[in-house]
Image (cartoon, helix red, strand yellow):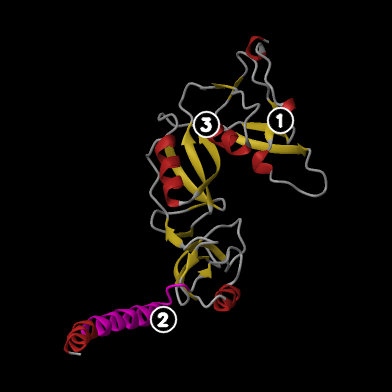
Amino acid sequence: MAGSRKVLLVMAPLGIAVLLVLGAWLWLGAYTRHDAKAVVPSLKGLTMDEARARLEEQGLQAEVIDSVYNDEAPKGTVVDQDPRPEKAVKPGRTIYLVMNAQQPKMLNMPALVNLSKRQAISVLEILGLKVKEMQYRPDPCMDCVVAQLYNGQPIAAEARIRRGEAVTLVLGSGQNGERVQVPDVRGMTLAEVKAVLNMASLNLGVVVEVKGCGNSGCDTALAKVVRQSPEPIKNNLIGPGGMIDVWLTMDSTTTAVPDDADDH
């Protein structure tokens, strides 16, 4: 009898300790909802109200942390999110959203006069502005910016302008009637063509057609130049600021450039 009582006295504290640990584990699991999960839905393209409603269905919350301006996405919609779609998170988690602004941000027009063409283009790209075209006028400094225009009128440095707008660069043409070789832009995308022509002191003229798009529309960013005018034959020169017209196609098999193209 005495032995049984002694065993009971030894086991009782151990049993109480096990019950306390088990109770704490069960409480902690319930408190942290250890097994509860929610799958983050894709919110891209939704308005703020739509995104909030979609998240509430999953027991999640929404918070806007930033806005950008993308003219290719619907205004006032989600363009990015964190955590990413399909990720499993705990209920109640906040999903951070980046929205597409209704209007592009305003910024100060940079001072481009007296910069080189390359410097001016670089500054515009960094700020999110575009080059509408390049005009040339006689000036001893070849390819130096002598004026900056917006909507055909001079725009002063520090004047307010919307991000994404396009400005015209007026550049010096030198005094010796300089001319440049017509570059070969066949096989390039429209974005690549614009970059090459900018560096060659030339402008993009007419985009004549996009074969292969039909009436359903397509992403012309993927189209490539199949023909150009003037042609890029050897010693075919053009004055600075000249126009290059291009024909685009979605058929990649027709954009191959002959090996002897420069020997015509």
- The residue sitting at 64% across, 9% down in the picture is 263
Image coordinates of residue 165 in percent, x first then y, are: 53, 54
Magenta residues span 13-35
Look at discs 1 and 2 and give the one toward the viewer.
2
- Label 2: which residue? 30
Q: Secondary structure at mark 3?
A: loop
| Residue 56 in view here | yes
Residue 119 higher or lower than 110, as above or below? above
Residue under label 1: 252
Q: Count the labels in the image.
A: 3
Q: Residues within 10 Å of mark 3 (few under 14, many from 20)?
A: many
Q: Is residue 187 left or right of residue 147?
A: right
**What is the CA distance from the residue labelled 1 to the residue labelled 3?**
28 Å
Which quadrant of the rendered structure holds the N terminus? bottom left
Disc 2 marks a residue whose amino acid type is Ala
Residue occupying image coordinates x 65% and y 16%: 233
Q: Residue at x 76, y 48 (%)?
A: 217
Q: Earlier in the sequence, mark 2 or mark 3?
A: 2
Residue of label 3: 201
